[in-house]
Image (cartoon, grey):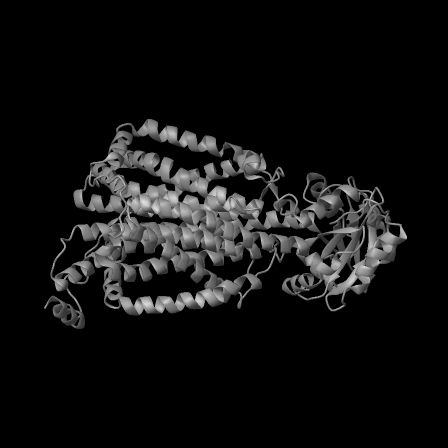
């Protein structure tokens, strides 16, 4: 199959390149427009109690949420000063009704909760027009500047919509910065790996094409469903990183195959040799890239099981990026190699070169033999190291997303801080209780019971209509902290009025429901992904033992990654280095995303390593020799690929969004652990201990694998010296 693909791409290389050019132009025009069609948020479970409470309240009373929380303040004027009032009310009166549906201010309500403790700041709540998040975001864009008053009064624009707008702007800036930082470093590393500019430039070219193609895929998905703005980050990270990794494997193998074929002065024979090299490359490295892409895509399908828009968007974006990167590496790149031929080694730089060592010679093979001489101590020490790295995860505390994910000094974050510090009577996100079907007496008793709960600063019946009531319970402190969490538990424990239904919502309840949703969905998602991965690894390795062992080692690697994240972000170990605000928690949806990506990438390197080992096992039947030779053949290329991918993800650790930093650091840590400790030490040690059992397979499954196995280095299905008749005629003419 892959040999035939290589031959087809070679024979139609110009047509493939022309189609690729059209696709890239289309992606450049349409794909880059995706930024204007993405939505904010998406961390909640649409079917949860808190979301049903919000829907019931909106159906009964219309939208009650504040979209913009604007803090107006002055160093010289009190809120009660006529000049202060005139400055702010002039702004509010001028807001167009087409964009702002309602405003709530101190002067319209007289509520002391809207007045700061020092009397020099006031909170104004704006409800924006629009039925969707996108429409309300567009309305805010139109009125944002109009909220700024004249004179001695200044405004801090905060709340859900401004915070989302600031996050979106930060995401776009982060992508530009990450690409600006990573591309020069990647180019230098690729030049070191290949020793020449042409070969080094090919992976970067394929990476850029993959990112544009993934943007186009994401743009098309927005026609079918809402997509979170954060999906752009995973598209860039995975699209660029995996495209470069896959191109690295394909270009390296093509250069090896070319080097094994003597240069001919006869154009016909030389072209046939190039074709043969490309066919062999696709039959080996191309096959491995395809298996790797499928494994990573399968791992990311775990995200599609979760109801949260954020995770589903990341899953859709990640799968798109992986498949586009894989497709570019299997079509565009071979076409470029077919055109370049031996010129792939052009523009070589005067760098020190070491002779390539294959088989059982070389440093990687010596490392493998050293490990296999003492497999038990090495395995125990490695497992102990991974367990120690994962130990901080035992103290993990889950939290949510608020304005603190933004860089210090961002306006919406400063507004949130001013609101928390200066308005002790205001609860920016009270516990919202929707009561349906209660009579007046029972409802009053229920409100009194809520009012007396420990931690509650008061319970108030704020709306009532047609048998539905909205009760808000206030508290002190932030919404995503233990006191508020305990209050929600207490509210949910209060018996509902006789004959009534109660739904508890609000930001704190939403976090509780989110964690419950993730916990209930995870077993199914993990089970399906592990089962599918085991099948793919069986097809790749022809073993029942190796896939199970790979999953077990992957669990140890993921545990170590989780421990690094808890130490770095929850405990603040990386706070000073990366410049984020320690909250004492980690955001749960990010961990799901990181673990899904890390699982796929770990299996990615498993495929690259064990495919080589399997090839040597088939050739020699000697387990120790197969492991040593397999590690020697793949060790350098896996290390190079891991280093390149780490550069991509670490570039995103410079993001201004805390949880984007967490994704970058988490995946980079997983890659480092997996490509070094696991692949270089734990894999050789465990394979030595298992011996021939590594390759155990019942006879029926052996026959199945012989027919459908995705093994590397199979027979070339196209005669290597064959050329299309028209190309033979053209080359024969050149020879004359």
Which of 299 and 244 lies nearest the eye of the viewer?
Answer: 244
What residue appears at the point 27 percent right and 31 percent down from the top-left corner? 372
The picture quadrant where one finds residue 10 is bottom left
Q: Is residue 573 visible?
A: yes
Residue 349 lies, in percent from the top left, at 28, 46
Residue 133 lies, in percent from the top left, at 65, 62
What residue appears at the point 33 percent right and 69 percent down from the top-left corner? 18
The picture quadrant where one finds residue 88 is bottom right
Viewed as shown, does residue 689 lie left or right of 718? right
Viewed as shown, does residue 614 lie left or right of 653? left
What residue appears at the point 68 percent right and 58 percent down from the top-left corner? 52
Which of 471 and 662 lies nearest the eye of the viewer?
Answer: 662
Residue 547 lies, in percent from the top left, at 34, 45
Viewed as shown, does residue 38 lie left or right of 537? right
Q: Is residue 710 visible?
A: no
Residue 238 lies, in percent from the top left, at 44, 52
């Amino acid at each position: 199959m892959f040999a035939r693909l290589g031959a087809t791409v070679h024979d139609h290389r110009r047509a493939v390149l022309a189609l690729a050019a059209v696709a890239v132009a289309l992606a450049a025009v349409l794909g880059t427009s995706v930024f204007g069609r993405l939505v904010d948020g998406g961390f909640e479970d649409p079917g949860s109690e808190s979301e049903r409470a919000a829907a019931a309240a909106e159906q009964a009373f219309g939208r009650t949420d504040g979209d913009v929380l604007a803090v107006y303040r002055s160093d010289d004027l009190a809120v009660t000063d006529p000049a202060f009032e005139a400055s702010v009310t002039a702004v509010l009166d001028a807001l167009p009704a087409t964009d702002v549906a309602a405003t709530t201010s101190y002067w319209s309500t007289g509520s002391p909760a809207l007045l700061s403790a020092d009397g020099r700041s006031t909170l104004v709540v704006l409800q924006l027009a629009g039925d969707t998040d996108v429409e309300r975001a567009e309305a805010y864009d139109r009125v944002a500047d109009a909220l700024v008053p004249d004179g001695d009064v200044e405004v801090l624009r905060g709340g859900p919509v401004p915070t989302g707008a600031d996050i979106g702007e930060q995401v776009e800036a982060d992508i530009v910065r990450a690409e600006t930082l990573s591309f020069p470093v990647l180019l230098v590393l690729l030049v070191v790996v290949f020793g020449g500019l042409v070969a080094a430039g090919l992976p970067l070219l394929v990476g850029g094409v993959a990112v544009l193609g993934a943007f186009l895929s994401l743009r098309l998905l927005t026609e079918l469903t809402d997509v979170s703005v954060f999906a752009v980050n995973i598209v860039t990270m995975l699209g660029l990183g995996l495209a470069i990794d896959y191109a690295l494997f394909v270009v390296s193998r093509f250069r090896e195959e070319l080097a094994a074929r003597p240069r001919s002065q006869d154009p016909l024979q030389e072209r046939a040799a190039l074709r043969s090299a490309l066919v062999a490359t696709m039959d080996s490295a191309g096959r491995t890239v395809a298996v790797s892409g499928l494994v990573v895509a399968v791992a990311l399908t775990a995200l599609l099981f979760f109801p949260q828009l954020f995770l589903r968007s990341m899953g859709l974006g990640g799968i798109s990026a992986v498949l586009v990167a894989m497709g570019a590496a299997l079509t565009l790149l071979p076409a470029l190699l077919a055109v370049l031929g031996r010129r792939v080694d052009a523009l070589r730089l005067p760098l020190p070169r070491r002779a390539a060592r294959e088989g059982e010679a070389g440093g990687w093979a010596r490392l493998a033999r050293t490990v296999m001489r003492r497999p038990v101590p090495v395995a125990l020490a490695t497992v102990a190291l991974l367990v120690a790295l994962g130990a901080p995860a035992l103290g993990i505390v889950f939290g949510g997303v608020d304005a603190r994910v933004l860089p210090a000094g961002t306006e919406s974050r400063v507004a949130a801080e001013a609101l928390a510090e200066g308005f002790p009577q205001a609860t920016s996100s009270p516990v919202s209780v929707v009561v349906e079907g209660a009579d007046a007496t029972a409802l009053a008793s229920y409100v009194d019971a809520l009012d007396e709960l420990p931690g509650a600063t008061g319970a108030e019946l704020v709306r009532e209509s047609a048998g539905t009531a909205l009760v808000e319970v206030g508290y002190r402190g932030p919404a995503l902290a233990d006191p508020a969490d305990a209050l929600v538990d207490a509210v949910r424990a209060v018996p509902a009025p006789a004959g009534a239904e109660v739904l508890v919502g609000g930001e704190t309840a939403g976090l509780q429901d989110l964690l419950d949703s993730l916990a209930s969905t995870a077993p199914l998602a993990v089970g399906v992904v592990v089962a599918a991965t085991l099948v793919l690894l069986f097809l790749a390795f022809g073993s029942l033992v190796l896939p199970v062992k790979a999953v077990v080692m992957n669990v140890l690697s993921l545990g170590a990654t989780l421990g690094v994240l808890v130490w770095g972000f929850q405990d603040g170990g990386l706070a000073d280095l990366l410049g984020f605000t320690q909250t004492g928690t980690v955001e749960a949806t990010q961990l799901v995303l990181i673990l899904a990506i890390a699982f796929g990438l770990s299996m990615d390197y498993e495929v690259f390593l064990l495919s080589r080992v399997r090839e040597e096992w088939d050739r020699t039947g000697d387990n120790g020799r197969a492991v040593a030779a397999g590690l020697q053949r793949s060790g350098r290329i896996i290390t190079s690929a891991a280093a390149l991918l780490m550069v991509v993800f670490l570039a995103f650790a410079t993001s201004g969004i805390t949880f984007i930093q967490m994704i970058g650091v988490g995946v980079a840590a997983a890659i480092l652990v997996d490509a070094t400790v696991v692949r270089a030490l734990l894999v050789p040690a465990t394979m030595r201990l298992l011996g021939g059992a590594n390759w155990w397979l019942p006879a029926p499954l052996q026959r199945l694998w012989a027919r459908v196995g995705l093994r590397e280095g199979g027979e070339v299905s196209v005669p290597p010296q064959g050329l299309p008749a028209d190309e033979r005629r053209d080359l024969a003419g050149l020879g004359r």
